[in-house]
Amino acid sequence: MAEVRLVNVKKIYPFVSGEEKKKNKKKKDDEPVKEKANLQITDKGVVAVQEFNLDIADKEFIVLVGPSGCGKSTTLRMIAGLEEITEGELYIDGKLVNDVAPKDRDIAMVFQNYALYPHMTVYDNMAFSLKLKKVPKAEIDRKVKEAAEILDITQYLDRKPKALSGGQRQRVAIGRAIVRSPKVFLMDEPLSNLDAKLRNQMRAEIIKLREKIDTTFVYVTHDQVEAMTLGDRIVIMRDGFIQQIGTPQEVFNHPANLFVAGFIGTPQMNLFDAALSKKGDKYVATILGRDFELPEAKQTVLKAMDKVPSEVIVGVRPVHVHLSSDGIDATVDVSELMGSELHLHVNSAGKDVVIVVPTTDIDIDSVHGGHKAVKYSFRPDLMHFFDKETEKNLF
């Protein structure tokens, strides 16, 4: 168990010269090359992670989340020691570990592709690192069997990986990490190779595992559902920068900017161009020709501003949009019946809007199906307001 601190950590990949490219070229000419877009390029090279600052408490479960190429896996690999830190400092349990070898950092890492030895049994895969450290046989046996029991894979200890399902192989990979009793547990998209049902099951297993082994977790995923369900806190990244750090509820209820608002939440937040103006002594937001008077808390903030923007972007989550007989006109393009909810994709003055309605609240036949006319509205206290230029949340 340990605290982890990252202080102004930066990762720069230096440019490769033409001669080095030829020497290191392993790809065929017709093979696609993966490139990371939108990352800052300096005279030193491509900046993959920008001055990353984060304090992870002992036994905390932190999730790094963001789209592909945002720097989250690179950050995890720097904590593991698999990537060199270009600038900044990394502390594990109060000790500066920038120049400490991965094997001496007392961390364990679970990879996306399991990385099991195919010729070894499950038992031998889990025991391998302990055998290398010359741990006594009796202790190895105890630790492997304890980990197998925690993960419910005792019955598979004599099997080889090819005889296991994807979920079982991932449990073995996690078990191999558990037996080492690491201070820090690192997980790099461990569920991305599993199907949807197995992912749900393994998410629940990781929550249970966390309660049983009680150590510090740093978990990387591009799946915001995983981030919301697993993390004590979430670190949302984009193009190497941290966008927001907070609890799942904080980033859902109070997104720091337009990117976080759109990234967190399924279905994605609806965004509207809106005008802010003062009518009498009250501020109103005009959206698609309708005026919405802002709640008192937002009125107070706006009145204290030196300059109130006249044009903003208003965000409303689909679950906060409701059907209303005197609301904004729309036509249903697509309706998806999801059991307890009906997802309506509607066209409103040429704009696509998603509405999530509990099936218990409506006559399904009246709205389910294409080209039906509906009206919708939303509560001003559930709106999010973003500056058009900076894209930051105004409140």
Image: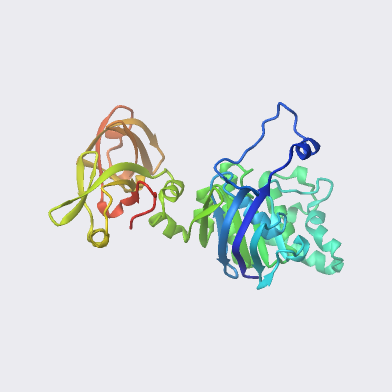
Between 71 and 149, the one lying in front of the other is 71
Indicate the colouring scheme. rainbow
User: In the image, is 123 to the left or to the right of 107?
Assistant: right
Identify the image quadrant of residue 272.
top left
User: Which residue sits at x=76%, y=62%?
Assistant: 145
Q: How many marks?
A: 0
Residue lying at the far left in this picture: please name it. Answer: 280
- Residue 298 position, x and y percent, is 26, 59
Between 263 and 228, the one lying in front of the other is 263
Instruction: Mark yes or no: residue 246 visible.
Output: yes
- Residue 104 position, x and y percent, is 77, 65
Identify the image quadrant of residue 373.
top left
User: Which residue sits at x=77%, y=42%?
Assistant: 162
- Residue 229 position, x and y percent, is 51, 55
In the displayed structure, 338 sits above or below 153; it is: above
Identify the image quadrant of residue 62.
bottom right
Instruction: Mark yes or no: residue 209 visible.
Output: no
User: Which residue sits at x=27%, y=59%?
Assistant: 306
Between 98 and 180, the one lying in front of the other is 98
User: In the image, is 331 to the left or to the right of 192?
Assistant: left
* Quadrant for the C terminus in the image: bottom left
* Quadrant for the N terminus in the image: bottom right
Residue lying at the far bottom in this picture: please name it. Answer: 94
